[in-house]
Image (spheres, rainbow, N blue to C red):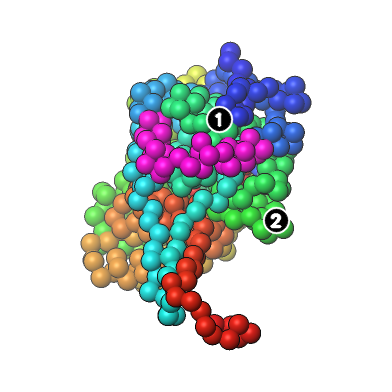
């Protein structure tokens, strides 16, 4: 069993507490690794190291082209080790190996994209409205960035922060989820191999309310980039407000998947299933509310039931597996609780609605893909994030009714529309209150385009050029080109 220390200032450091946390494989229940239980002392060491590295000319005066070169090298190393990294990540979060391997390969692409962008972040010369001055804008890094991330897709979601932050010249302290830290510690080893200067890329581990809260309160931290639940997000936002830190929040969702009667039926079935049963529903962008035009409601639900009841459920290491286990015991219990809540609120369970036991279900942390009908937006199952394979289906009669139902949510991460009518697709896309709208597809993301939430789903964006801007600050530089002869007591 591997014991992972923390990466601080280019060295593997043991925790000040001397304590370790077990990493448990969700499928088997076996402890396969241990991570350090970091605390405020370790947070301080890591932030001090990142701050010193930010000031060090080795990094601060490195050209953007050279920074891009380091990111490209890291992307190459991720590609080289993709299978190994995917196996480690799958051991932590129980996600299907096919999905994890695809995600890890995509992580390399994130590093390549931001490697290329590093030396294309231009300032601007401003046609200023004053005589005798030359004005230009520089985009500068912020300083020390803290990245705090959840357990569902640790390498991907953290790299969405690491790649742009480093491309823009910041230094970083990563605090992954206590459930899924090993992949990020492996990434730290690869960053060292790629040649990043010491202190530029640090990874500390431990619990959110211990080392996590110490990081977000640290006075040398310029920005916190957080992905997680809205409660943790609120704590980050409060700490940021107290200490004038910049903040990006990627939080939860209750995304609406709207299917009109004119949609390609089979494609929409695939999209509805991908939306809620991909990754066993443990994804922020889950299409957990399915809105069906009434005329297709019964046929659509019947077909979905057929497909999910034939799904391969079992060991995530098996390439045939389509639905794997729930990543943590706490999450498993939370999902079962929501199933009971939905039943008690009067929803009809048409398939699933229970845990799965049996030899193929390992230690038993599995939930049968669950579909509820007879639901409405006032129910908790339609308003609160379950983060599991549980779908609430609601019928609608008119387009306006569908939009009203879709937007009647505190969240606004994503939404999808299924229709063959282009006008309807654009009309809905314009009106849906969500950071991402998919038309005739679901769960597509890319490093080239921004991702983020409206409303309680967060603030700021990740991905694309927009994502890089979150790690930069503008400086306006004024250069006098002619002597100034105006009255010095009057603002010129
Ligand atoms: P979580 O909020 O419990 O934990 C996320 C991270 O925050 C962990 O590293 C945790 O240790 C840390 N943390 C918790 N409390 C903290 C505190 N007080 N101070 C500092 N750090 C703290 O979330 P989770 O259960 O790991 O993940 C599930 C949640 O993440 C879901 O709500 C899901 O929607 C959300 N998520 C959002 C996105 C997105 O891009 N919008 C992507 C994936 C997951």
Image coords of residue 152 (percent x, y): 51, 38
The mark that comes first in sequence, 2 or 1, is 1
Q: Give the residues drawn in magenta, as a range.
A: 47-75
Q: Camera-side residue: 215 or 427? A: 215
Q: Which residue is mark 1?
A: 198
Where residue 492 is drawn, which disc sits there?
none
Q: Camera-side residue: 476 or 1? A: 476
Residue drawn 58% across the image and 13% down it: 1
Where residue 243 is drawn, which disc sits there?
2
Q: Camera-side residue: 261 or 59? A: 59
Q: Residue 18, can we see it? A: yes
Whether the magenta-drawn stretch holds residue 22 is answered as no
Q: Where does the C terminus fall, quadrant-wise?
A: bottom right
Is residue 203 placed above or below 228 in the rendered structure?
above
Whether the magenta-drawn stretch holds residue 71 is answered as yes
Specify the quadrant of the image occupied by residue 202: top right
Residue drawn 59% across the image and 50% down it: 223
């Amino acid at each position: 069993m591997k014991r992972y220390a923390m990466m601080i200032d280019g060295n593997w450091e043991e925790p000040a507490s001397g304590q370790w946390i077990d990493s448990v494989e969700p499928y088997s229940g076996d402890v396969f690794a241990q991570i350090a239980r970091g605390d405020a002392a370790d947070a301080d060491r890591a932030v001090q190291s990142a701050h010193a590295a930010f000031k060090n000319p080795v990094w601060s005066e490195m050209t953007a082209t050279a920074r891009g070169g380091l990111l490209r090298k890291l992307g190459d190393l991720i590609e080289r080790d993709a299978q190994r990294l995917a196996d480690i990540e799958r051991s932590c979060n129980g996600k299907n190996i096919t999905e994890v391997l695809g995600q890890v390969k995509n992580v390399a692409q994130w590093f390549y994209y931001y490697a290329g962008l590093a030396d294309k972040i231009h300032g601007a010369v401003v046609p200023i409205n004053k005589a005798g001055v030359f004005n230009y804008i520089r985009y500068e890094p912020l300083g020390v960035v803290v990245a705090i991330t959840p357990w569902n897709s640790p390498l991907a979601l953290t790299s969405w922060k690491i790649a742009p932050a480093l491309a823009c010249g910041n230094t970083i302290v990563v605090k992954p989820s206590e459930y899924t830290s090993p992949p990020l510690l492996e990434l730290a080893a690869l960053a060292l191999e790629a040649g990043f200067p010491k202190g530029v890329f640090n990874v500390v581990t431990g619990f959110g309310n211990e080392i996590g809260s110490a990081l977000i309160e640290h006075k040398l931290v310029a920005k916190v980039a957080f992905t997680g639940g809205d409660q943790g997000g609120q704590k980050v936002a409060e700490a940021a407000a107290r200490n004038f830190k910049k903040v990006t929040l990627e939080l939860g969702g209750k995304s609406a998947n709207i299917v009109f009667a004119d949609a390609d039926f089979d494609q929409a079935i695939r999209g509805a299933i991908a939306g809620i049963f991909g990754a066993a529903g443990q994804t922020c962008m889950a299409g957990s509310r399915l809105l069906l035009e009434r005329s297709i409601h019964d046929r659509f639900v019947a077909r979905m039931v057929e497909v999910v009841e034939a799904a391969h459920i079992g060991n995530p290491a098996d390439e045939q597996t389509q639905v794997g286990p729930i990543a943590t015991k706490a999450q498993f219990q939370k999902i079962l609780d929501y199933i009971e809540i939905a039943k008690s609120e009067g929803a009809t369970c048409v398939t699933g609605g229970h845990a799965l036991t049996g030899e193929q279900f390992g230690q038993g942390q599995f939930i049968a893909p669950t579909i509820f009908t007879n639901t409405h937006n006032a129910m908790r199952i339609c308003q609160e994030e379950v983060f599991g394979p549980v779908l609430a289906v609601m019928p609608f009669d008119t387009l306006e009714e569908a939009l009203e139902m879709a937007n009647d949510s505190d969240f606004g991460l994503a939404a999808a529309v299924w229709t063959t009518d282009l006008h309807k697709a654009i009309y809905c896309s314009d009106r849906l209150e969500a950071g991402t709208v998919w038309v005739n597809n679901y769960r597509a993301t890319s490093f080239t385009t921004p991702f983020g939430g409206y409303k309680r789903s967060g603030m700021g964006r990740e991905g694309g050029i927009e994502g890089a801007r979150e790690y930069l600050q503008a400086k306006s530089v004024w250069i006098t080109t002619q002597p100034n002869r105006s009255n010095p007591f009057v603002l010129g």
